[in-house]
Image (cartoon, rainbow, N blue to C red):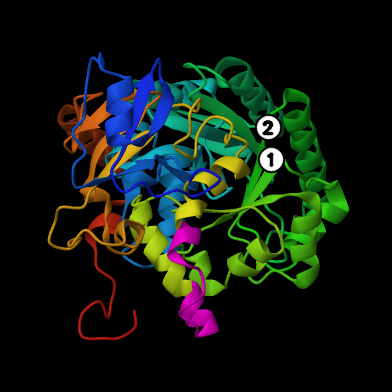
């Protein structure tokens, strides 16, 4: 993913002090570094920059498949468990599991909203932010944690569990704002720069409640100004036709330090606004929003908009596997245009590496294998029946690889996955704790049916 997009047939990478110090033919790099203390044998493997996921949600790894395909049941479960069934331990364990899943699949950098959608943000107490960030630091992944306020009206109804004791509270907007500001002060740039903070406000569109419009825009302007004064990026989740133009008219919030997710069925005016302001886009080809409408990602890219590929997290029915997501992105747009030349293999690989790094203002550090950059590096095992023979490796990686083919993962030059085994934490013990905590959250909220009941028409029908 360097400026020349080189593919070195028999290549090697040298790392020192957490940074890349050489990239080139294996014989030359080895000869120049005869005293390396560790060598990773990457024969029959592709060496790539770590993958980047531009939009995910914390919490979602705990509630995969909730609602069994019933969208309302899914959203109700998100709201109840996140806002009323969880304590800091829930968010600590979920962050550990999600980070481990991403790491295992070769994603070394992700953005994660601390909650679901924009109505269940768990930013009412700094302890939730701390729990998440501490887990991210322990696993070793790089992450932009997105904190923000939920959609009104206020005060918002929240509960916090400490052990099996529930404390219910009414939370004003000012509490969310102050927690977000404290999160920036405490965590932005922490853990050797691997943890960063961005701010969020909910999207307003025609389907949103209309009785608090003035309050909504005032809060959005306040949070956007806070992001600018703190020097951090700003994010919104769930844009669709008309909402981007409305946002810009009311707040002037667009800019190179902002990125928006989904952006389905947007107008030509809105596409121009994104291009003219330099606003970035996270395209979630596998998300439910991409079923309800289409993000014009190829058209935006042609207009000069930085578009990165994102998984939208792992629930209700998705995966953190960016290889799966790349394949889906290609076919999603090819079907729309009825043209198999749309979204070439090389373009989608850029969208999860160098383009995503540029979109998040991280391309001076990561996104490509270049001398001087931080050593976020993965290897993909090509010596497998579904990958062989060893021809056209870029196509093999994008079209045929899956997350489980990732063999080694390094972040900041530290080996975190070796031969497919995560080294940084005892993930088996963590998963046992995850099961206990997930069961507790379900029990607290009475949401057992969302996880154990199949909907009508599940079998022998083409529609629920």
Q: Tell whether position 335 is magenta.
A: yes
Q: Picture coordinates of residue 18 (x, y %)?
A: 40, 19
Badges 1 and 2: C-beta atoms under 8 Å apart? Answer: yes
Q: Nearer the viewer, residue 221 or 448?
A: 221
Quick check: can you spot residue 163? no
Residue position marked by numbered label 1 in the rendering: 154
Q: Picture coordinates of residue 185 (x, y %)?
A: 63, 16
Between the residue at mark 1 and the residue at mark 2, the CA separation in whole angstroms equals 6 Å
Rendered view: 160 above or below 272 = above
Q: Nearer the viewer, residue 329 or 232?
A: 329
Left or right, 191 with reference to 441: right
Q: Earlier in the sequence, mark 1 or mark 2?
A: 1
Image quadrant assignment for residue 261: bottom right
Quick check: can you spot residue 246? yes
Q: Tell whether position 12 is magenta.
A: no
Q: 10 Å neighbourhood of mark 2: few (<14), some, or many (≥20)?
A: some
Residue position marked by numbered label 2 in the rendering: 172
Q: Bounds of the magenta span? A: 333-348
User: Who's the residue at 45% across and 29% down the image?
Assistant: 160
User: Who's the residue at 12% across and 61% down the image?
Assistant: 385
Left or right, 362 with reference to 86: right
Circle 1 SS class: loop
């Amino acid at each position: 993913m360097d400026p020349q997009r080189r593919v070195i047939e028999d290549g090697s990478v040298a790392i020192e002090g957490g940074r890349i110090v050489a990239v080139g033919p294996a014989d030359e790099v080895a000869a120049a570094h005869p005293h390396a203390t560790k060598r990773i044998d990457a024969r029959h493997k592709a060496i790539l920059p770590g993958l980047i996921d531009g939009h995910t949600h914390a919490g979602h790894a705990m509630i995969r498949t909730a609602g069994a395909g019933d969208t309302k049941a899914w959203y109700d479960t998100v709201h109840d468990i996140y806002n009323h069934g969880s304590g800091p331990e829930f968010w600590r364990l979920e962050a550990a599991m999600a980070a481990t899943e991403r790491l295992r699949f070769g994603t070394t950098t992700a953005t994660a909203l601390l909650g679901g959608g924009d109505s269940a943000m768990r930013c009412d107490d700094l302890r939730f932010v701390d729990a998440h960030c501490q887990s991210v630091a322990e696993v070793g992944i790089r992450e932009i944690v997105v904190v923000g306020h939920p959609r009104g009206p206020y005060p918002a109804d929240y509960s916090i569990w400490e052990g099996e004791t529930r404390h219910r509270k009414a939370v004003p907007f000012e509490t969310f704002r102050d927690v977000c500001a404290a999160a920036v002060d405490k965590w932005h740039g922490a853990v050797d720069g691997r943890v960063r903070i961005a701010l969020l406000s909910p999207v307003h569109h025609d389907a949103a409640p209309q009785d608090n419009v003035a309050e909504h825009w005032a809060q959005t302007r306040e949070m956007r100004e806070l992001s600018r004064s703190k020097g951090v990026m700003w994010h919104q989740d769930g844009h669709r036709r008309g909402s981007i133009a409305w946002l810009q008219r009311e707040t002037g919030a667009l800019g190179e330090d902002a990125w928006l997710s989904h952006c389905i069925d947007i107008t030509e005016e809105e596409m121009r606004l994104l291009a003219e302001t330099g606003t970035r886009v996270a395209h979630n080809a596998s998300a439910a929003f991409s079923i309800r409408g289409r993000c014009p990602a190829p058209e935006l890219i042609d207009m000069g908009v930085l578009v990165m590929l994102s998984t939208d997290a792992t629930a209700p029915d998705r995966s953190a596997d960016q290889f799966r997501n790349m394949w889906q992105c290609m076919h999603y747009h090819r079907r729309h245009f009825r043209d198999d030349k749309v979204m070439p293999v090389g373009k989608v690989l850029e969208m999860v590496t160098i383009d995503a790094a540029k979109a998040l203002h991280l391309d001076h550090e990561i996104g490509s294998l270049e001398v001087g950059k931080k050593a976020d590096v993965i290897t993909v095992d090509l010596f497998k029946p579904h990958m062989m023979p060893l021809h056209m490796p870029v196509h093999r990686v994008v079209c045929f690889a899956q997350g489980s083919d990732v063999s080694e993962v390094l972040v900041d030059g530290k080996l975190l996955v070796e031969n497919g085994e995560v080294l940084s934490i005892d993930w088996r013990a963590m998963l046992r704790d995850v099961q206990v905590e997930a069961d507790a959250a379900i029990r607290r909220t009475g949401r057992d049916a969302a996880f154990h009941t199949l909907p009508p028409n599940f079998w022998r029908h083409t529609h629920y």
